[in-house]
Amino acid sequence: MRSTADYYEVLGVSRDASASDIKRAYRQLARKYHPDVNGGSAEATERFKKISEAYAVLSDPQKRRRYDAGGLGDFAFDGGFSSFFDIFNQAFGFNMSGARSSPGRDREAHITIELEEVLIGSERTLDYERIGLCETCDGSGAAAGSTPVPCSFCAGHGQVRQRRETLLGTMTTVITCPECKGTGQVVKDPCEDCAGRGVKSIAEQLEVRIPAGIRDGQHLELRGMGDVSLDGGPPGNLYVRISVTEHPTFTRHGDHLYMPLDVTISQAALGDMVTVKTIDGEHELTISPGIQSGTELRIKGKGLPSLGSNRRGDQVVSVRVKTPTELSDRQLQLLRELAIEDGVDITPPADSSIFERVKRLFGTR
C-alpha cells in the first residue's frame, strides 16, 4: 500500500521546495535518524525509512509530478533502489557500485594553551580549511538545473570487467571504471564553483573543547571533520595538536608541578612560615628549622589533574638555601660570631673583597 504520510511534511519542506531544498532537508534528517547513529533503535529506523521513502519520491521529477497529481499509486522502490541505505548513499554521494572506496584525507591543526588552562580545561575557536562538499551544487558536481547522468562506459555500475586470454584460459578481472572513477555517474554540465568535482576547499570554524589534564604534544581527534572522500568513502578526521607554553614558575612532570623556593640562611636555620604560589592560588608553607638545601616539600593535590580524571597531582617545592653575596658590616660581625660559636676558625681568602673588611672589624691573626 502507498504510504499515507505527506512526504513534504515528513521532510519538513513546503510543496514548492526546490530540489536542493529537498536534498538538504533529507540530509539533515538522515544524519539524525540513521540506524547507525541511534544504535539500531526501532523508532529511529522506522523514521529513517519514512524520510528515505519521501526523498526517493520528491527527489525524482517524474515521481514528484505524479505524487503532486495524486497518481503515484503503490510505491515500493520502483526507481531502482535496493534499500533505504541506497537512497542514503545516493543523497550523500557515496559509492553504490560496490567498488572499494577510500576515506577522505585527515587534517591536522594546532592550538597553543597556557598551563593554567590545563587545570580546568578550555574552549578555543579553531579556524582551518578542508575539502568539503560544494554548497552550490550540493556535492553533485552538476550546474544548477542539471543532474549527473549514468556513465555510458560502465552503464552506471562504476566497474568494468576486463577479459584476457592466458595459458590457463580466459581471466576476468573487475576494475574501477576509468571514466566515472567508480561513481557510476558523469557530469555533462559541470558546476562552475567546483569545476564539476562536487567538492572544494572550504573554511571551517569549530569550537574545540580542550580537556583538563591534557599534555603538551597530545592530539584531539575530531572524527569526520577532515576532508570528504572523493569516491564516496567516509570523511577523514581532524587531529588537533595541543602545545602547552612553558610557565615562568612551574615545571611540569606528569601531573606534578615543581617549583624552586629560595630561603635565607636565617630562615633555613630558624624555620619560617612562607606563602608560595600554586597553580590556582596561594598556600602557606612551613619551613622547618634546620632545613637543608635540596629538601623537597610536597603540597598534596595542588598539581594538575590526570586526563579524564578528577584526581590531581602534587606541587613539589624544592628548597634552595641562598647564600648572601653582599653583606653589611653588621651581617659580617654576626656571621663571624656564629662561626666562633660553632668553633670554626674562618679565614677569608686574601684575594676576596671580604678579607679587608674582616681584618678591619676583627683584626688579623
Image (cartoon, helix red, strand yellow):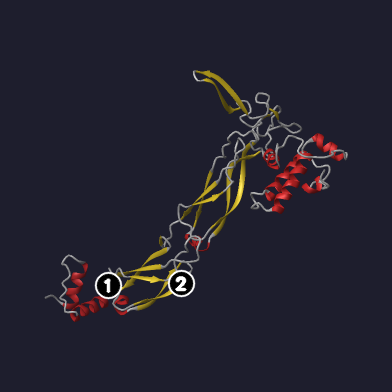
Q: Judge from the rendering whether residue 251 lies leftward or rightward of residue 8; answer left or right.
A: left
Q: Quadrant of the C terminus?
A: bottom left
Image quadrant assignment for residue 202: top right
- Characterize the local packing of mark 2: few (<14), some (14-19) or many (20 or more) Cα atoms within 10 angstroms: few
Q: Is residue 6 above or below residue 159?
A: below
Q: Residue at x 23, y 77 (%)?
A: 335
Q: Kindly identify which numbered label has been placed on residue 343.
A: none
Q: Residue at x 61, y 46 (%)?
A: 204
Q: Judge from the rendering whether residue 85 lies leftward or rightward of residue 165; answer left or right.
A: right
- In depth, the one of 293 and 14 nearer the eye is 14
Label 1 element class: loop
- In depth, the one of 76 and 352 nearer the eye is 76
Q: Residue furthest left?
A: 365
Q: CA distance from mark 1 to mark 2?
A: 31 Å
For marks 1 and 2 on the same chain, the one whose residue lies earlier in the sequence: 2
Q: Judge from the rendering whether residue 117 lies leftward or rightward of residue 325; answer left or right.
A: right
Q: Quadrant of the N terminus?
A: top right
Q: Amino acid at mark 1?
A: Leu
Location of residue 210 in the rendering, given as x and y in whole percent from the top left corner: 54, 56
- Residue matched to label 2: 282
Image quadrant assignment for residue 123: bottom right
Q: Is residue 140 above or below residue 127?
A: above
- In depth, the one of 254 and 74 nearer the eye is 74
Q: Amino acid at mark 2?
A: Glu
Q: Residue furthest bottom?
A: 341
Question: Which of labels 1 and 2 is toward the front?
Answer: 2
- Characterize the local packing of mark 1: few (<14), some (14-19) or many (20 or more) Cα atoms within 10 angstroms: few
- Residue matched to label 1: 327
- In depth, the one of 1 and 286 nearer the eye is 1
Location of residue 287 in the rendering, given as x and y in whole percent from the top left corner: 35, 76
Label 2 element class: strand
Q: Residue furthest front?
A: 168
